[in-house]
Amino acid sequence: MDKPRTGFAEKRRLRRTLMLVAAVVVVILATVGITKIEPAAPPVERETLWIQTVERGPMSRDVRGPGTLVPVDVRVISAPVEGRVESIPALPGAQVQPDTILLELSDPQVEQAALEAESQLRAAEADYQNLRAQLESQLLSQQAEVSSSTSLAEEARLQSEADEVLAKDGIIPEINLKRSRLRAEQSEKQKKIEGERYRQSERGNQAQLAAQRARVDQMRAMYQLRQRQLESLKVRAGIPGVLQELPMQVGQRVTPGTTLARVARPENLKAELRIPEGQARDVVRGMQASIDTRNGIVQGRVDRVAPSALEGSVIVDVVFDGPLPRGARPNLQVDGTIQLERLDDVIHVGRPAVGQAGQTVQLFRLEPDEKEAVRVPVQLGRSSVTTIEIVGGLKPGDKVILSDTSAQDGFDRIRLE
C-alpha cells in the first residue's frame, strides 16, 4: 500500500517563488549594469580631419583682407558751367597729357558773357586813357601857372632889390621902394598859392586815376573769369595719365558739378584693402603689410585707416616700398596681409574651425597612441590669420583636431580610423 507524500505542493510553490525572485534580481542587475556602461566611441575617418601639433615659439599676429589696386593720383573732372556736349575726342583707356581735350561743351550764355566782359574791359580801359589825358592836360596848364607866378615873383624880388639900392642913393622916393616891396611880397604869395594848387591838382588826379584803374581791374578780372569759363568748355585732362571714365554722350546736357571724366596715373598705385571690422581695430598707420598681386608678393606699409566701417569692413590703404610686378594695373584684385605684432615665445596652434580670441572652446586632443581623441576644454588667447595662442588646456607637443567636429557633439571621445 502506497504512502501519501505530504508537503510536495508547498515545496514546489516555494521553488517557483525563489526562481521568480532570482529572475527579477538578475533583470534589475542587468539593467543597472547596462546603464553604467559608457557608449562606444564613434569612429571617424582620419583623412577627413585637420590635425595639428601644438607648438611653442614665435608667432606673428596678422589680419588679412581682399582689396584692389587703385591709383594714388586721381583727378575727377567736373563741369564748371552748364553746357551741352558737342564732341568727345578721347575715349576711356586713352593715354592723355595735361592739355589733352577730353570733350567739348557749348553754352551760348557763357560765350555771350565773355564777349560782354571783353567789351566792358575795353570801354573801361578807354575811359581810363581819356581821363588820364584830360588830367595831364589840366596839370600842364596848372604847371604853366606855377612857372608864370614863379617868374613874376623872381622879377618882383629883383626889382625890389634894385629899388633898395636906388632909394639909399636918393634916386627914387621912399614910396616907390615900398610899392616895389609890396609887389615882391604879393608875387611870392601868389607863387606859393599856385604851387600848392598844383600839388593839390596832382593828388586829385592820382585819386581819380586810381578809381578808374580799380574799375579797369574789376572789368579785367570779370573778363578773365568769363574767359576761363569759356575755355573750360574745352574739358582737358589736367594731368598725364590714363582716361579711366568718361560717362558722357554727345548731345547730353550737363549742369555745374556733374562728373565728366576721371583721369589717373597708372604708374603710381596703392592697395585698398577691406579688413573685417572686428579685426581692423588694431590696425594703425605705419604697420608692415604684404600684398599678393597673383603675380608676386610686394611689401608695403599702412598709409591710411578709414575712420568708419562700410558694410562690415574698414578700408585700409597700403603704399608700396618697391616697384610692382608686371601686369599690375588699376582695379586688379589682390589679397593683403597686415602684421599687427610679433610674439616671440608663445604656445600656439592653427586656428580651429570654431572659437574666437579670448574664448574657451571644446577640442578633441589625440591620445598618445593616436587611435582615439578625447574632448578637452581649451582657453584661446590672441589670434592671427592662421594661428591662435593657447592660454590653457593644451601643452606643446599635443596633437589636436582643428576641423569642425559638430557631428560628434554628443561624445567625449572618438575613435580614429
Image (tube, rainbow, N blue to C red):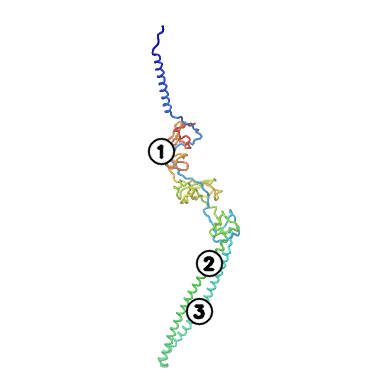
Where residue 385 sits: x, y (%)? 47, 43
Q: Is residue 79 left or right of residue 8?
A: right
Q: Amino acid at mark 1?
A: Gly
Q: Does label 1 or label 3 sit earlier along the sequence?
A: 3
Where residue 108 sits: x, y (%)? 58, 64
The residue pinned by badge 3 equals 138
The residue pinned by badge 2 equals 222
Where residue 319 sits: x, y (%)? 49, 50
Mark 1 vs mark 2: in front? 2
Q: Does label 3 or label 2 sit earlier along the sequence?
A: 3
The residue pinned by badge 1 equals 392
Mark 3 vs mark 2: in front? 2
At 51% across and 70% down in the image, what residue appears?
215
Q: Quadrant of residue 87?
A: bottom right
Q: Is residue 373 above or below residue 4?
A: below
Q: Amino acid at mark 2?
A: Met
Q: Is residue 37 above or below residue 128?
A: above
**Gap in Å between the C-alphas at discs 1 and 3?**
104 Å
Element at label 2 = helix
Of 394 and 42, which appears nearest the observer? 42
Q: Amino acid at mark 3?
A: Gln
Element at label 1 = strand
**Gap in Å between the C-alphas at discs 1 and 2?**
77 Å
Of 99 and 382, which appears nearest the observer? 382
